[in-house]
Amino acid sequence: MVETVVLKVAMSCQGCSGAVQRALSKMEGVDSFNVDLKEQKVTVTGNVKPEDVFQTVSKTGKKTSYWEAETEIKTEAAPAVTETKTEAAPAVTETKIEAPPAVPETKTQNATPLTAANTTENTPAPATPASTTTTA
């Protein structure tokens, strides 16, 4: 007699679903099975006993329970969702940005602040030293 067994199996990755697939592929009487990682749902069809399917999947170490009839009805009423494979986002690369080199300060030697007292308008021209000539 052909039976369909639906289980809820805690699977977090492709490795988990692979373990369940391997176990079911070795089980006698299984005609087909579907492992839905996103829904955490395993459907097995074949000449199998529900308890045997439950025990086989449980031996993979994954938390296993029977899929509730209420959930099955709600799932059938909902529109079909197509699962698409997405690639993981690229790793974030941290780039260290260094501050630009400091600009050295320019010092002006002998600079005096410009004030009214030291502008050329108020200051007489500097005296030129008298030239002295020596004759020998």
Image (cartoon, helix red, strand yellow):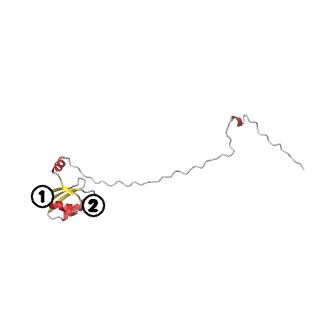
Q: Position of residue 72 (x, y in %)?
A: 17, 50
- Report crowding for label 1: few under 14, some 14 to 19, many 20 or more residues within 10 A (C-alpha): some
Tag shown at residue 15: 2
Name the residue: 14% across, 57% down.
4
Horizontal relation, residue 126 to residue 69: left or right = right
- Three-letter code for the amino acid on which mark 1 is drawn: Glu
Which quarter shows the N terminus? bottom left
Q: Position of residue 58 (x, y in %)?
A: 20, 61
- Labels 2 & 1 near each other (Cβ < 8 A): no
- Three-letter code for the amino acid on which mark 2 is drawn: Gly
Q: Position of residue 102 (x, y in %)?
A: 56, 50
Q: Position of residue 77 (x, y in %)?
A: 17, 46
Image quarter of residue 59: bottom left
Mark 2 to mark 1 CA distance (whole Å) = 27 Å
Foreground residue among 135 and 75: 75
Tag shown at residue 73: none
Query: How many numbered tags mark residues here?
Result: 2
Foreground residue among 89 and 6: 6
The residue positioned farthest toward the right in the image shown: 136
Foreground residue among 111 and 12: 12
Earlier sequence position, callout 2 versus callout 1? 1
**Considering the numbered disc 1 on the image, is that residue within a helix, a strand or a loop?**
strand
- Report crowding for label 2: few under 14, some 14 to 19, many 20 or more residues within 10 A (C-alpha): few
Image quarter of residue 48: bottom left
**Considering the numbered disc 2 on the image, is that residue within a helix, a strand or a loop?**
helix
Q: Which residue is mark 1?
A: 3
